Amino acid sequence: MRNPCLLIVVAMIAFSCQGPGVVDRNDDGSFEVAPPPSPPRIPVACDRLQTCTSSDECGAGNGCNTTLPIPSCQKLNCSREGEPCDPTGDSMCERGLGCTPSGRCRVPECGERECGADPNGVSCGMCRTGTTCSYWGKCECEDPSKTGDSCDECKNPAKKGDLCDQCVNPLKTGWFCSLCVDPLKTGEDCERCLDPQTTGDSCDECVKTYKKGPGCIACVNPVMAGLLCNELAPNDCHLATNQLILDAPKGFEAVYACGMPCFGLGLRCIQRCLYDDVGLTAGCACCVSNWIDCSLKYCGPTCYIDADGPDCQACVTQNCPPSYDECVGCTTSHQSFK
C-alpha cells in the first residue's frame, strides 16, 4: 500500500515548483491542491448584482449563485477555477469548466493544461525559458507582445522590431498601425488622399482641374462659378468684403495696379490678379476687370501717373461707363473688351 504521507510530500514538492498553493488533506486520506491565486478581476465582470433565492429573479445572462454566503445574482460563465458555483443551477463557471458537486468551479486536469498543477497536485509540466505559466495553465511568452515557439515573433502581425514597437508598413503609425503617417492620406497602404477632391503625392492638387484652393471649391477661372465652374459669376461688388477694398483711400490704385502688368494680355490676366492678389470675389473681379481694361485703353497715361487723381477719375468717368457697382456679371457691353 502506498504511503499517503509520502504522496503528500511529493505532491507538495512538485507543486511548489510551479508556484504557491495550499495542500488540503481530506478525511479519507486524499488531498486537494488549491488553484493558484486568481489575477485581479476586471471590475463589474462578475459582480454580485443583488440578493436572490432563484435565478428567475436575476434576469437574462445572470443566475442565482446559492453557494455564496449571501446568495446573489451573478453573471453566468464568469466564475474562475476553484471559485464558488451552484452545481444545481445555471453555469457559473467560465470556459465551460463545470461546477463540481462540492460547489466549486472545476480545476482542469493535466490533459487540459500545459503547466501548473492539476486538482490532485500533480505537476502538469514546466514552461521553457522566456515563457511563464498563466492562470489558465498555458505557457505564454513573458513579453506579452511576443508569440511563437521561441517568443521571437510579434503577436500583432502589423508590428516588428525587438520591442514590437515599429510598424511593418513604414507608411503606417499608431498602436495598431492603422493610421497613416501622412494625415492627408488614407487607405490600406495610404495610397489615397483623405479628401477625395484632392490628388497628388502631397494631396495638394485638385482632382477637377478647373478647381483650386483649400477644399478645391474655388474655380481656376475667377470669373466662373458653380460646381462645374461653367457659370458666369454674378456681380457681388456690393458685398462688404469687396466694399472694404474698393472704398479704401487707395482702393482704385490697388485694383488699377493689376492692369499695368496685364496690359495686352487680356481680361483673364486682370481677373486673376484681382481675385488672387487684391482679394476681390470672383463676380466683382469680373466686373472690375472690364472697367480697368477700359481705363487702360482710354486713360492709360493719365491714370498711370496718379490712379486716384482727379484727371484719371474724370477720364474714366467719361470714357468707361458704367462703373463696377452697376455691372452685372460679365454680361455688359464691356464684354467686347475680351
Image (cartoon, rainbow, N blue to C red):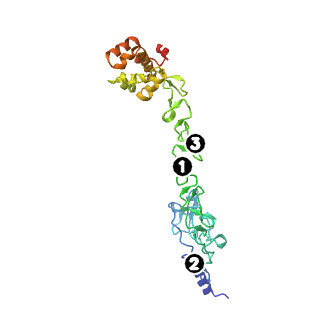
Residue located beneath label 1 in the image? 179
Q: CA distance from mark 1 to mark 2?
A: 45 Å
- Whether residue 91 is visible here, answered yes or no, is no
Dot 2 amino acid type: Cys
Camera-side residue of 93 and 17 = 17
Residue located beneath label 3 in the image? 192
- Residue drawn at x 54%, y 49% is 179
Dot 3 amino acid type: Arg
Camera-side residue of 157 and 117 = 157
Question: 10 Å neighbourhood of mark 3: few (<14), some, or many (≥20)?
Answer: some
Q: Is residue 222 left or right of residue 94?
A: left
Q: CA distance from mark 3 to mark 2?
A: 56 Å
* The image quarter in which residue 115 lies: bottom right
Residue 104: give x, y in percent of width and height.
59, 71
Residue located beneath label 2 in the image? 17
Residue 209 numbered mark, or none: none
SS type, badge 2: loop
Figure check: 53 above or below 206 = below
